[in-house]
Amino acid sequence: MSMNSPSTFACPACRRSLYDRKRTTCGYCGARLPDDLRFSKPMRDALERGDFTEKDRLDIRVDGSGDYSP
């Protein structure tokens, strides 16, 4: 499995799993995260608004998709 498969997104600097794909930096080493490892802006906004049920959130984590279109 690659380090950035949908079930394990990892920081390119320290290789630790990302625990929050809304952040701009790694929560462990502070390195800036490339945009392709982060949720898209519409997805981050939707998460902040609470547009998803808990099941949806689990599905998003498993799917790994950073895209969202309301």
Image (cartoon, grey):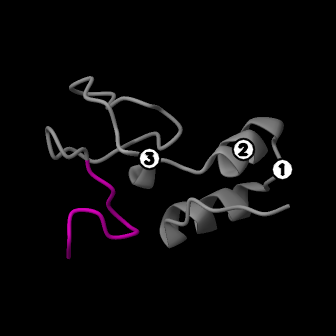
Q: Is residue 3 found left or right of 66 in the rendered image?
A: left
Q: Nearer the viewer, residue 60 or 25?
A: 25
The circle on residue 47 is: 2
First in sequence, mark 3 or 1: give its number.
3
Q: Amino acid at mark 3?
A: Asp
C-alpha separation, residue under disc 2 versus residue under disc 1: 6 Å
SS under mark 2: helix
Determine the secondary structure under disc 3.
helix
Which residue range is magenta in the image?
1-10
Q: Is residue 13 above or below residue 38?
A: above
Which residue ends up furthest to the bottom in the rendered image? 1
Q: Looking at the rendering, in which quadrant would you find the N terminus?
A: bottom left
The correct choice, above or below, for 37 with respect to 7 in the image is above
Q: Position of residue 40 (x, y in %)?
A: 60, 51
Question: Of circles 2 and 3, which is in front?
Answer: 3
Residue annotated with mark 3: 35
Please identify the dominant SS of the magenta region: loop
Q: Which residue lies at the image location 16% right of the left edge and 46% below the top edge?
A: 15
Within-10-Å neighbours for mark 3: few <14, some 14–19, many 20+: few
Looking at the rendering, in which quadrant would you find the C terminus?
bottom right
Amino acid carrying label 1: it is Asp
Horizontal side of residue 17 vs 50, given as left or right: left
Counting other residues with Cα less than 10 Å from the Cα at mark 1, is it few (<14), some (14-19), or many (20 or more)? few
Q: Residue furthest top?
A: 30
Q: Describe the element under mark 1 as helix, strand or loop.
A: loop
Q: Quadrant of residue 8?
A: bottom left
* 63 part of magenta stretch: no
